[in-house]
Amino acid sequence: MITEFRQKQKLDKIDELVKLIGCYETVVIDIVSKVYDHEKTCAIYAFEANRSRKSSSFTPVNEFHIINLLIQEDKKNMIWDLFHEHGHQQDIFLRKDHEKLYNNDDSPTKRCLERELYAWRKADKEFYSHPELKIESGNFTTFKIEKLATYGLTIKKLNIFHDAANHLQIANPEYETVFYRLVNMAHEKECSVDYGREGYEYLSSHEQNYKDGSNYRIHIKKYSYQNNKEFIWDLLHELGHRFDTPLTISQEELNTNIKLRNEREMNAWKAADILFKKQYELRNDLEEYTVYKEKCLKSYELTLEDLDKHKISKNNSISIEDFEI
């Protein structure tokens, strides 16, 4: 429940930003209210560009969050910025690991790509929830393209991830968080993730050098699942393959080497089991996950008992036991 003091802060900020932005008053009131009514206390500070700060930002500080909103010549851009930063505010994973993702000298841009995609997905939803903004679609898209470019991202990639997240179609938003977390992990392991690419009707993963700098790629099938949670189970399994030793033979040769193929499939499910246990949001889904895993193992004439008995080879060079997510 919002306190009287908090309510006054919200109303004061609404008054300030309505006057400052000077357009789409009902939209400004709505988005500022959402920021201040969020479960985590957040404040918005409008600022002029300076040497140290040249763009809007979202910063979680313990239990208090700050949105620094850049004052821009085209005031509508401030609304788009608010949509985007509010998207970050809703990101459970980002709030937990913001410093690790954005303030790390080890390729910070690469580490936060999926958080930006997540925030823009939320911004898109917010934009299209306001019918009065329909005439601003071109301006909003242009602004979004410019911002994505600063992270080396494109509208095409954003749309791919929108499509994948929409495919989940699950009421619980925590599954979407799991999806972006796993994709973020894939990027950290130099693994790219494609969804719905033509020619890949089934989910698979491939190991080779790609133009985007990755040496491993997961292709996620696009046709409907009987249960959309299976989308997550498949992603866990294919990401599990990334933690196996590099493949030294071709995919065709692997398909004819039944013993090695089965060993690698069980290695991947062993890794998937570990990854599953690390996802707090999936804590009530073990039974469904196990049923799906058993169905997949049967396609290779394997059983859950075979998997329980299977020991990952000591020669395996990649371990995820201590991998933090």
Image (cartoon, rainbow, N blue to C red):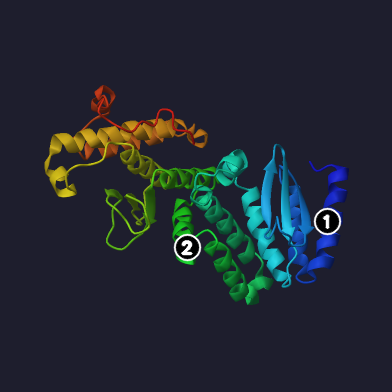
> Badge 2 is on which residue?
159
Residue shown at the point (53%, 55%) measured from the top left: 117
Which one is in front, 11 or 82? Answer: 82
Residue 246: % across, % down:
26, 40
Q: Is residue 106 left or right of residue 316?
A: right
User: Dot 2, crowdedness within 10 Å: few (<14), some or many (≥20)?
Assistant: few
Q: Nearer the viewer, residue 14 or 85?
A: 85
* Residue visible at 28% across and 38% down in the picture: 295
Is 302 on the left-hand or right-hand side of 133?
left
Q: Position of residue 208 (x, y in %)?
A: 27, 51
**Identity, as a three-letter code, of the amino acid under mark 2:** Asn
CB under 8 Å between discs 2 and 1: no
Q: Amino acid at mark 1?
A: Lys
Of callouts 2 and 1, the N-terminal one? 1
Give the x, y percent position of residue 59.
68, 47
> Against 286, is 77 above or below?
below
**Image side of residue 51 versus residue 214, left or right:** right
The answer to whether residue 244 is above or below residue 201 is above
Residue bearing the label numbered 1: 13
Q: CA distance from mark 2 to mark 1?
A: 33 Å
Q: Quadrant of residue 323?
A: top left
Number of residues whose C-alpha sits closer than 10 Å to that of mark 1, classed few (under 14), some (14–19) or many (20 or more): many
Query: Splitting the image into 4 quarters, where does residue 263 fall?
Result: top left
